[in-house]
């Protein structure tokens, strides 16, 4: 009986801690269904991975000895999305990062929890 009670308590504690897990982003307003949230989660994490591989080495900043992703304004992100900066067209051409991948990076940067670093 004690073992069964112990297992039930462990399951309840595990479920409670999972329910309280903080997400690294805020859902966009249009992600209002479970399937839309699942799709956004996939897009967010894909953008995060691409950012780490392709963008972080030039854009991250060292703050208190910790590498930090700066906060980008919406106009800055829109400029990146349309590849307005010539240096990005040269360093990161469409053959290296597709429009879809770039859109995922922009979604990651737009909806992630902000760092307070500009």
Image (cartoon, rainbow, N blue to C red):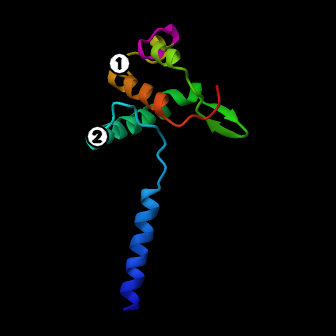
Left or right of 39 on screen, residue 71: right
Residue at mark 1: 95
Most extreme residue toward the right is 64
Secondary structure category for the residue under label 1: loop
Secondary structure category for the residue under label 2: loop
Give percent across and percent down for residue 61. Answer: 65, 30
Q: Residues within 10 Å of mark 1 (few under 14, many from 20)?
A: few
Left or right of 64 on screen, residue 94: left
The mark closer to the camera, 2 or 1, is 2
Looking at the picture, tell me which residue is in the foreground, 27 or 99.
27
For image coordinates 45% across by 18% down, the residue present is 92
Give percent across and percent down for residue 49. Answer: 43, 37
Give percent across and percent down for residue 116. Answer: 64, 32
Question: From which residue to which does the magenta span run?
Answer: 80-87
Most extreme residue toward the bottom is 1
Q: Are marks 2 and 1 in contact (CB under 8 Å)?
A: no
Q: Is residue 65 above or below residue 109?
A: below
Marking on residue 8: none
For image coordinates 47% across by 8% down, the residue present is 84
Give percent across and percent down for residue 90. Answer: 47, 12
Looking at the picture, tell me which residue is in the foreground, 117 or 56.
117
Residue at mark 2: 33
For image coordinates 53% across by 37% down, the residue present is 113
Q: Residues within 10 Å of mark 2 (few under 14, many from 20)?
A: few
Q: Which quadrant would residue 99 be assigned to in this image?
A: top left
Q: Give the tally of numbered discs.
A: 2
**Residue 85 forms part of the magenta stretch:** yes
User: Can you say which quadrant of the picture contains the C terminus?
Assistant: top right
């Amino acid at each position: 009986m004690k073992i069964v009670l112990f297992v039930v308590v462990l399951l309840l504690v595990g479920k409670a801690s999972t329910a309280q897990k903080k997400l690294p982003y805020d859902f966009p307003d249009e992600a209002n269904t479970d399937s839309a949230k699942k799709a956004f989660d996939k897009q967010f994490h894909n953008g995060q991975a691409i950012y780490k591989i392709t963008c972080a080495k030039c854009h991250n900043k060292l703050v208190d000895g910790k590498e930090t992703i700066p906060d980008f304004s919406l106009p800055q992100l829109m400029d990146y999305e349309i590849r307005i900066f010539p240096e990005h067209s040269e360093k990161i051409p469409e053959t290296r990062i597709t429009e879809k991948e770039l859109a995922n990076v922009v979604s990651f940067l737009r909806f992630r929890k902000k760092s307070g670093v500009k």
